[in-house]
Amino acid sequence: MLSMLPQVLVDGLTLGFMYAVVALGYTMVYGILEFINFAHGDLFMVGAFVGTEVLLTFEALGTLEGMNPFVAFFITLIVAMAITGALGVGIERVAYRPLRGAPRLVPLISAIGVSFLLQDLVRFSEAIYRNEFYLNSPQLFTGSLELGFATVPQKAIMVMVIAIVLMIVLTLFVNKTKWGIAMRAVAQDQSTASLMTINVDKVIMLTFLIGSSLGGATGVLFAQNYGTIDPYIGFILGLKAFTAAVLGGIGNLRGAMVGGVIIGLLESLSGAYMGPLTNGAFGAEYKDVFAFSILILVLLFKPEGLFGEAVKEKV
């Protein structure tokens, strides 16, 4: 069991970084609007399909084989981020902005409706265009790095590197730029921010643009790492990324990153060792139960999360 631990940790880190990037989208929107965008996981799914369709188009044109894999990967990444970012802005404008002053349950129901709508639109369009909605993404990175104690696939390295770069760029953007300062101001108090000449609507739109783009980028990483995608991959992964955001402290960027990595590692470890440790009573299929049990425990004993701050109600 110890001999397989390094490989399990590599797999867990790869999965955890994907959870972390998706969790950033959840936590950005919540930090400003105090609203859980449950359609965010399906934006991740759309990014996976957009990226796969770009690669399949290159393949059909006969250009993929002679193309530098890094060039093909970054073109795919940019296209997926652009489309999912624009889609996220459109969803905010149509489904969320008109409900901004409504009770919190109303936009939540709207988000769930958007989630189902995206799933069915992708399933319908792929069924018409390709006569199926399960796609196998062309793999750009098929080699691996042998470290002696573990084998690290090139695609796993790309997932971790791109995820880390995206998280660093987002952190610098939020903390060092004018728009980032505006985001933090709106998160503190929308009314006061608007009095200080900050355009709240533009800040919220930019938040959805960035968060949705991150989700789309993660979809490309997922398709490259796991190969097969379908219109429902965003549901469970989105819930786990939401769990990661809650674990780290919803609304806290650093917490979302750490929470994603923790969930990925715990899920990988439970999937590998739960069967042997329980003599087969619980197999790898129970790893999802393990992940959501963490959410229940966090909500019971530390609802503000690892890096969140308990809110004191003023009397």
Image (cartoon, rainbow, N blue to C red):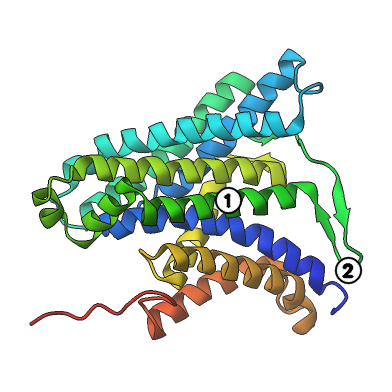
Could you tell me which residue is drawn at 61 percent across and 31 percent down?
Answer: 76
Q: Nearer the viewer, residue 75 or 36?
A: 75
Residue 133's tag is: none
Residue where numbered disc 1 is placed? 165
**In the rendered structure, which disc, 1 or 2, sits on the residue that comes first in sequence?**
2
Q: How crowded is mark 1: few (under 14 residues within 10 Å), some or many (20 or more)?
A: few
Could you tell me which residue is drawn at 57 percent across and 26 percent down?
Answer: 126
**Cα distance between the residues tagged 1 and 2:** 26 Å
Label 1 SS? helix
Q: Is residue 192 in view?
A: yes
Q: Residues within 10 Å of mark 2 (few under 14, many from 20)?
A: few
Could you tell me which residue is drawn at 63 percent across and 22 percent down?
Answer: 130
Q: Which quarter of the image is occupied by the C terminus?
A: bottom left
Label 2 SS? loop
Q: In which quarter of the image is residue 270?
A: bottom right
In the displayed structure, does residue 262 sit left or right of residue 187?
A: right
In the rendered image of this protein, does residue 285 appear above or below residue 92? Answer: below
Residue 149's tag is: 2
Q: What residue type is labelled 1?
A: Val
| Extreme residue toward the bottom, this view | 301
- Mark 1 or 2, closer to the camera: 1
| Extreme residue toward the right, this view | 148
In the rendered image of this protein, does residue 307 appear above or below residue 241? Answer: below
Total numbered labels = 2
Could you tell me which residue is drawn at 31 percent across and 46 percent down?
Answer: 179
Image spot of residue 158 (x, y percent): 70, 47
Image spot of residue 20 (x, y percent): 53, 59
Q: Which quarter of the image is occupied by the N terminus?
A: bottom right
Q: Nearer the viewer, residue 191 or 60?
A: 191
Q: Is residue 132 in view?
A: no
